[in-house]
């Protein structure tokens, strides 16, 4: 027991330190880097949610974008229609997306394999069109989501992007810390147990159905938060903010990170932010067309997804681990 | 012109299922591999028919290596494996099950005649020709599984526990048929069995496997009278 | 009268859905993977058909070209990609998710390539017959020559598929390999080659579904995404394993959507689809038309 408390305390200290370092860094880098940093934090959270769901509870969701959309819309509606404080809006995003996940989870989480992946993918494809059908969701133009400027006590020079980064990083740090603790707890072990052998887990007294729905709801809740952060970063929510490619992106991030380990989510998120940069550089150097600009990022993401599945199926961490084992021999 | 297995080792995941097994079955002989549950009998057979890759060792049939070959190629070469659990496709009819090997046979006439010969050996199958295999009784399914192998024109027949879950009377009947097939069609047969008594009665030779290792090889007659084998596997 | 009209349009929509559903079920049966790349395969095949139509001015050449292209793409994907994938990814918990994730990656790659070649804007395919409705007396039906063409084309291809499956040797090989790859191999059937053939059939069905689908709407790299959703839901209604179920599921969904649109609201397409999907998953996960037990694992 002692060691578990120790590791929990270590984790806490690590996260606080990481947060402190991030704040220091944000002071020393430019606007663009701050903005990109905010995206990295948002993606990290989204990837962590998918790792919880797929890597731990064994449910492959292809529609994280849809869950993020639910959070994004809830936050924007709360802030705009109800004019509540942005922090309340973010919390609303968590609650509504969690509830949504719970409902969807009841329908699909008890199923697995093709039904789950197909249904979640169908959700991701259809949700943007669904949003268009309800006028209160703002249709194509969407709804504005403005978290406002940084408090004046941070000083005049405190930029909007830095403020985005602070919010994003803080929200992601707290959430990922919570997720990490959850995965290290009895929940995490039970999820792994049902993932590896559902029948055996059920025989040993676990309730696979309930555990899966719980995982779905929790993953959905935090995905909602990630969606709200995304909407904050692009300052408005509309169907086009949550295309199918967003779900692909998150999945790629998770596979690159290694679906079975939370460590390295930041690496996966960094990759996602770097890819458009690389694509941009390639297009510029080739003097490429508009078509290349619009299709290259998607191509690179998908290629990365396939290569990751083919060559480091259990994540780069697994590869390193495997190499170590081989050299020892 | 024999089946020669030499120093064969097969892993099942991280478990060593078959360890340095060697034996020889001369052409036209019926050899039975007996042993308790988990002795590695099925794994051995699956390696011989190409379903799994062995770790090391060799196995030749008529001087050609049969290891690491795709099972469909071995089947076309006359090495027919009848897996345990009455391996029939429940969703297909009796006729369709039997027709599977005729799908790749060039000579359609002889394919037809081999179907007819199966119906002569197992008249019960002829009665049920259009029924789904899933509706058959356990014994009938076993007949169907063996019948399918016969249609493929076997030279070497690998049978995995044909007696599993069958009533003693049916077992007797199936075993007599196996013996008849061996002599009439001049087949070489490897019969894996837990039912050691019945198997040794029809076999020419017996191989006793325990925890993946060969513990005895002898003529079936001698094994039947061997007190140690009797005590361990025949239940007296 | 409205009842009859809706029934007719439902027939036309449903027939396209059942083709897509068949395309998914064919691969599922042989490979145990829901092939999400099918949306990409279908769109690429349809672009090939589009090019042929532009060049030859013949819809029929385009339709045949789309089917051939679909078959070729399907076979190539299985031969060069899925085989390698199954060989490489053998161990670890990733085994369960790798094939699905890989088909998704393929979908992304195909869509990016089609987008690069043909652009993201809408192209349209001119059907060989008028898109207007038949006229009976002084009434114009919502169902016209194009709808009739779609229903006939799908019916003919379904009949051909049924004959292949029930009456030919390769059909028996396909069924045997789908039900039990191991027994089929032990009976001397080249299961890998048969599976590639199944992918080709599936690709052809997808190509046909694609070109018929866009003859009513517009072609762009994402045009088949929604068709994939409808095809998947149809396949689930049909039980995922059964070809007859896939067809029936397609018609059920097509009818349901058309009736919901006609009697409730034009925005009801996706809500209806999801309602049906969720209801089937909750009440009868094995599908409405499947005799076998539900597959929850």
Image (tube, grey):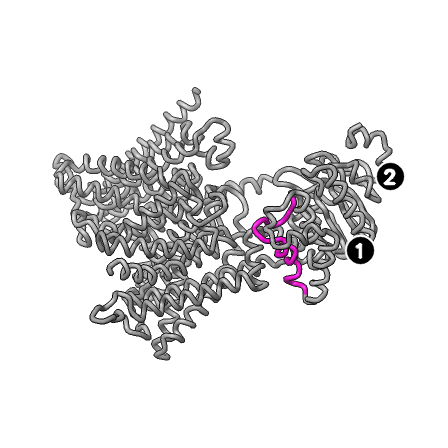
Q: Nearer the viewer, residue C264 or A299?
A: C264
Circle 2 residues within 10 Å: few <14, some 14–19, many ≥20: some
Report if residue B93 lies within the magenta region: yes
- Viewer-nearest residue: A196 or C296: C296
Secondary structure under tag 2 reads helix
> Residue C137's quadrant in the figure?
bottom left
Q: Tell me the quarter of the picture where residue B64 sits.
A: bottom right
Sequence-wise, the earlier of marks 1 and 2 is 1
Asked whether, in this view, residue A279 is left or right of residue C286, the answer is left
In the foreground, B158 or B177? B177
The residue wearing badge 2 is B221
Magenta residues (range): B86-105
* Residue C40 position within the rendered picture, expressed as x and y whole percent measured from the top left: 39, 60
Q: Report the residue marked by disc 1.
A: B185
**Farthest residue, direction bottom:** C56
Image quarter in which the N terminus of chain A is found: top left
In the drawing, does residue A114 fall left or right of residue A76?
Answer: right
Element at badge 1?
A: loop
Expressed as whole percent of the image width and height from the top left, the position of residue C91 reads: 54, 44
Chain at numbered mark 2: B
Crowding at dot 1, Cα within 10 Å, few <14 / some 14-19 / many 20+, comes out as some
């Amino acid at each position: 027991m002692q060691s578990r408390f120790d590791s929990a305390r270590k984790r806490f200290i690590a996260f606080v330190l990481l947060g402190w370092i991030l704040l220091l860094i944000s002071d020393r880098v430019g606007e663009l880097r701050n903005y990109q940093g905010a995206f990295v934090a948002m993606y990290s959270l989204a990837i962590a949610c998918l790792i919880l769901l797929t890597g731990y509870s064994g449910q492959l969701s292809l529609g994280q974008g849809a869950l993020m959309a639910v959070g994004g819309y809830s936050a924007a509606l709360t802030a705009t229609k109800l004019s509540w404080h942005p922090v309340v809006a973010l919390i609303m995003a968590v609650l509504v997306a969690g509830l949504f996940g719970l409902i969807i989870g009841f329908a699909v989480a008890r199923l697995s394999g093709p039904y789950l992946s197909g249904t979640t993918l169908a959700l991701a494809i259809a949700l943007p069109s669904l949003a268009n059908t309800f006028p209160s969701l703002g249709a194509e133009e969407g709804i504005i989501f403005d978290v406002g400027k940084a408090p004046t006590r941070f000083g005049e020079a405190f930029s909007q992007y830095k403020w985005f980064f602070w919010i994003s990083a803080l929200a992601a740090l707290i959430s990922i810390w919570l997720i990490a603790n959850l995965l290290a707890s009895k929940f995490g072990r039970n999820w792994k147990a049902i993932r590896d052998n559902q029948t055996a887990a059920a025989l040993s007294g676990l309730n696979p159905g309930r555990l899966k729905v719980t995982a779905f709801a929790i993953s959905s809740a935090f995905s909602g938060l990630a969606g709200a952060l995304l909407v904050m970063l692009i300052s408005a929510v509309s169907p086009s903010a949550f295309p199918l490619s967003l779900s692909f992106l998150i999945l790629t991030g998770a596979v690159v990170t290694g679906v079975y380990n939370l460590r390295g989510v930041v690496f996966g998120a960094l990759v996602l932010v770097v890819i458009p940069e690389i694509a941009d550089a390639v297009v510029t150097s080739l003097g490429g067309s508009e078509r290349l600009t619009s299709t290259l990022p998607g191509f690179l993401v998908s290629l990365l997804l396939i290569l990751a599945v083919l060559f480091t199926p259990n994540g780069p961490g697994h590869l390193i681990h495997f190499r170590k084992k081989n050299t020892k021999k | 012109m024999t089946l020669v297995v030499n120093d064969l080792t097969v892993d099942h995941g991280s478990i060593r299922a078959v360890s340095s097994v060697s034996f020889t079955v001369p052409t036209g002989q019926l050899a039975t591999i007996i042993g308790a549950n988990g002795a590695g009998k099925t794994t051995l057979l699956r390696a011989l028919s190409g379903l799994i890759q062995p770790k090391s060792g060799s196995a030749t049939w008529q001087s050609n290596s049969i290891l690491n070959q795709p099972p469909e190629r071995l089947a076309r070469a006359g090495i027919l494996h009848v897996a345990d659990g009455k391996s029939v496709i429940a969703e297909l009819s009796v006729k369709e099950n039997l027709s599977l090997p005729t799908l790749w046979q060039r000579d359609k006439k002889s394919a037809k005649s081999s179907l007819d010969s199966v119906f002569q050996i197992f008249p019960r199958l002829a009665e049920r020709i259009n029924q789904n295999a899933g509706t058959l009784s356990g014994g009938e399914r076993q007949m169907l599984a063996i019948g399918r192998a016969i249609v493929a024109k076997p030279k070497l027949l690998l049978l995995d526990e044909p007696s599993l879950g069958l009533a003693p009377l049916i077992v007797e009947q199936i075993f007599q048929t196996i013996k008849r097939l061996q002599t009439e069609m001049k087949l070489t047969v490897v019969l894996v069995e837990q039912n050691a008594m019945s198997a040794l009665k029809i076999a020419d030779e017996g191989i006793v496997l325990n925890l993946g290792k060969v513990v005895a090889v002898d003529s079936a007659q001698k094994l039947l009278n061997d007190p140690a084998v009797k005590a361990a596997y025949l239940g007296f | 009268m409205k009842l009859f009209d809706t029934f007719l349009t439902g027939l036309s929509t449903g027939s396209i859905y059942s083709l897509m559903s068949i395309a998914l079920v064919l691969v599922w049966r042989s490979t145990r993977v829901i092939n999400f790349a099918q949306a990409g395969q279908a769109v690429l095949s349809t672009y090939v058909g589009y090019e042929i139509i532009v060049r030859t001015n013949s819809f029929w050449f385009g339709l045949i070209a789309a089917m051939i292209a679909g078959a070729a793409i399907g076979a190539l994907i299985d031969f060069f990609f899925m085989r390698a994938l199954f060989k490489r990814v053998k161990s670890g918990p990733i085994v369960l998710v790798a094939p699905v994730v890989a088909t998704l990656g393929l979908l992304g790659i195909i869509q990016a390539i089609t987008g690069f070649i043909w652009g993201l804007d809408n192209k349209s395919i001119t059907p060989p017959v008028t898109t207007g409705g038949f006229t009976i007396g002084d009434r114009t039906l919502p169902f016209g020559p194009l709808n009739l063409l779609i229903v006939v084309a799908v019916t003919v291809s379904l009949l051909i598929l049924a004959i292949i499956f029930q009456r030919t040797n390769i059909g028996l090989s396909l069924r045997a390999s789908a039900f039990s790859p191991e027994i089929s191999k032990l009976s001397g059937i080249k299961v890998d080659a048969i599976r590639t053939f199944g992918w080709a059939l599936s690709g052809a069905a997808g190509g046909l579904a694609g070109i018929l689908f866009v003859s009513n709407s517009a072609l762009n790299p994402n045009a088949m995404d929604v068709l994939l959703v409808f095809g998947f839901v149809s396949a689930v209604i049909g039980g995922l394993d059964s070809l007859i179920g896939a067809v029936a599921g397609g018609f059920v969904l097509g009818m349901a959507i058309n009736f919901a649109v006609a009697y409730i609201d034009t925005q009801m397409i996706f809500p209806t689809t999801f309602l049906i999907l969720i209801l089937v998953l909750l009440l009868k996960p094995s599908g409405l038309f499947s005799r076998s037990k539900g597959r929850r694992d």
